[in-house]
Image (tube, rainbow, N blue to C red):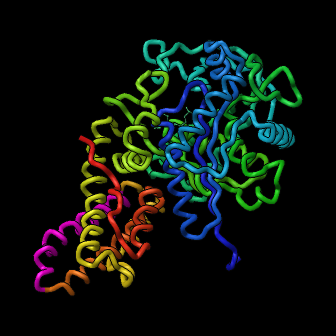
Amino acid sequence: MENEQKKFYVTTPIFYVNDKPHIGSAYPAIAADVLARLHRQLGEEVFFQTGTDEHGAKIEAAAKKAGKAPKEFADTVAAQFSLAFDQLGIAPDKFIRTTDPEHEAAVEIFLHQLKASGKIYEGEYEGLYCVGHEAYIKESELVNGLCPDHKTKPEKLKEKNWFFKLSDYQKQLVELIDSDQLEIRPFSRKNEVLSFIKQGLEDIAISRPNVKWGIPIPWDKNQTVYVWVEALFNYCSGVGFGSDPENFAKFWPADLHIVGKDIIKFHCIIWPALLLAIGLDTPKRVFAHGFFTINGEKMSKSLDNAIDPNDWVAKYGSEAVRYFMLREIPFGADGDVSEEKLKARFNGDLANGLGNLFSRTTNMIEKYLDGHIEEFVASPKDLSAASDAFYNSDFAGGLIRIWEEIAWANQLIDKAKPWELVKEHPDKVKELLLNLAALLYDIALKLAPVLPETAQKIKAVLESGDIKKPEPLFQKIE
Ligand code: MSP
């Protein structure tokens, strides 16, 4: 065990393909990408999975509205997600689609195992179904008869379904979560889930008789599997359940599921119970982040206030968008976003802060040391606290620490006034510049998971050993 390389399997939710991505949907993917890069930097074997959730009534309806067949429609939107992620520098090891034949085959095996567990029975359910949520909604949750999130009227359904005995798992789930064998973070979410479970769990329907666009229930072809049950299983099918046992054994259980706070019950109650039923380990950690809001209202496709990440990337670059999203709002909290705020971070933190430190340092190295810094050595500052913060998904905290160092270094230059000092003490200026180069190098290493391209630019310039007019990192936007 001791010599075994550590592994890290991180996932995002898979995204509904009813509409193109917005910056809220890119958020968990950026966070997961940063963690994947960080764990890779630490020498771990990493698997980062994201993808698209393509079956069910919601997608069927969106395709119909667009005048397309569901698969054709899903192909187009899945490609938009994949491209938008790519342009944000998000580099998953696997982009899974629930219409992938491997996933469909794995779900079939999973359903057989579930049936064999004895936890499946046939029954009838009557309730209000919100297609936007792809879930039943309680009468008490409605506002003026509408779903408060989607502002739509739920459908009254009375159906014959296959049920899963979720209620059997109440005690086991409380134990798992209480003991942190399944860590739910932030702690407030852990408490929320625990108190929900303690109120008592009801069994859930795992099939839908009237939804054609889905994976058939193997023993009852008139029904398709409930889209959430199928979607959750992507976390197993994507790493090789049913197709690549070796890879599956290596990466399962997932080390971290990053999810939005709206879908924690699916991930912290239904998902672990399904895994327990088929005898698989439960995930180690679920981290729930908050929502991006626009003027206080959740950004969403259905509310028509969504910002297209491609627009921001085209204007500010992928690095600035990544930085902004992780720096502006503590991971776990809600927060308002706007282009004004992005621009302020761009000009303030990136152009004036990091960009300025880089330009001043490299310009002076060119001017006073003839561009030569062969002798610069390890950093005088310890920034490991920043990496620790990232490691614990405290992205804003880690970035704040790094920017404290940047501010400190910029002040050091202001105080030392190398342009005056150089007349009498060129040796002191040399020492200062070597220290600044070392600090910048260290900052680049620490920043690499969040700003991979910028970190690479800084490292390449400093490592070249002969600095000649490097390009500025960020051009201020007026
Ligand atoms: N398909 C399901 C997830 C299945 S996972 C097995 C789903 N899809 S979704 O496209 O509606 O949402 C995907 C993720 O994006 C969710 O975690 C959700 O919280 C997140 N976000 C959607 N809008 C968001 C914001 N405005 N802000 C932050 N995250 C948001 O749910």
The C terminus appears in which quarter of the rendering?
top left
- Horizontal and vertical percent position of residue 94: 67, 48
- Magenta-span inclusion, residue 10: no
Query: Residue at image x 49%, y 25%?
Result: 301
Residue 465 location, quadrant: bottom left
Q: Is residue 340 above or below residue 268?
A: above
Query: Residue at image x 14%, y 73%?
Result: 419
Q: Nearer the viewer, residue 291 or 31?
A: 31
Residue 167 location, quadrant: top right
Give the number of callouts. 0
- Horizontal and vertical percent position of residue 239: 73, 51
Residue 76 location, quadrant: top right
Describe residue 190's horizontal placement relative to residue 347 as left or right.
right
Describe residue 12's horizontal placement relative to residue 394 as left or right.
right
The N terminus appears in which quarter of the rendering?
bottom right
- Horizontal and vertical percent position of residue 467: 35, 71
Query: Residue at image x 21%, y 87%?
Result: 427
Describe residue 10's horizontal placement relative to residue 31 as left or right.
right
Q: Is residue 14 above or below residue 151?
A: below
Quick one: which residue is furthest to the right in this view? 219
Query: Residue at image x 35%, y 30%?
Result: 294
Write the start and end of the magenta stretch as one range.
397-424
Describe residue 19's horizontal placement relative to residue 414 as left or right.
right
- Horizontal and vertical percent position of residue 32: 54, 51
Q: Nearer the viewer, residue 399 or 440?
A: 440
Q: Is residue 128 above or below residue 252?
A: above
